[in-house]
Image: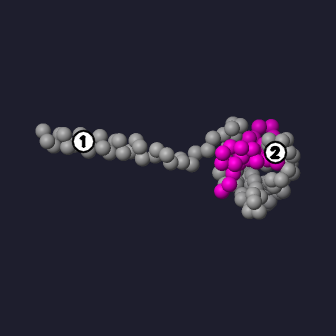
Amino acid sequence: MNFKKTALALIFAFTSLSIYSHEGHDTGATKSLHGGIVKKSKNAFVEIVQDEKVEIYVTDHSYKNLISPNFIVSAFADVKGKKIPLKLESHGSNLSVVTDLKKEKHFKLNVVLKINGQEEQVSFPLEN
């Protein structure tokens, strides 16, 4: 009888600990505000939405928009090891890629952010 009580107490204790072990911790999960793919850099979230054109949204870690005239964002496509600079067009809350990448089947979109004098880069494997 004593063994059953001890076993049940141990099972309850370990179950309780596992339930609360992640409480208050950041899981690292990011949320998409525009239905795209989100990657986290040191100081920002970058979201890529690929429909008829490729759109770039940049927010801080509190999800406040960072796109402004004082914020520097550039991008290039890596196609089979060849770097293709991309022209970006600002739309206030986001940027869109003006360069046509429709002919490329697979490419890596690299977004370069300049925040407080430091450069950060995130990459997104994309395909058409």
Helix, strand, or loop for circle 1?
A: helix
**Residue 63 screen position, x and y as percent:** 68, 43
Q: Residue at x 84, y 56 (%)?
A: 85
Residue at x-position 16% and y-position 43%:
3
Please, what is the three-letter code of the amino acid marked with disc 1? Answer: Ala
Q: Nearest to the eye among marks 2 and 1: give it.
A: 1
- Name the residue rendered at 30%, 44% in the picture: 13
Query: On the image, numbered disc 2 is attached to which residue?
Result: 95
Residue 43 pos. (x, y %):
68, 54
The image quarter containing residue 82 is bottom right
Q: Which kind of residue does numbered mark 2 sit on?
A: Leu
Q: Is residue 117 placed above or below 3 in the rendered structure?
A: below
120 or 65, which lies in front? 65
Query: Residue 106: horizontal and vertical position, in percent?
Result: 73, 49
- Describe residue 8's horizontal placement relative to residue 108 as left or right: left
Q: What residue span does the magenta drawing correspond to?
A: 42-68
For residue 9, the mark is: 1
Q: In terms of secondary structure, where does tag 2 sit? A: strand
Q: Residue furthest left?
A: 1
Residue 19 x %, y %: 40, 41
**Mark 2 neighbour class, 10 Å CA radius: few under 14, some 14 to 19, many 20 or more:** many
**Residue 78 seen in the figure:** no
Residue nearer the viewer, 56 or 98: 56
Q: Quadrant of the C terminus?
A: top right
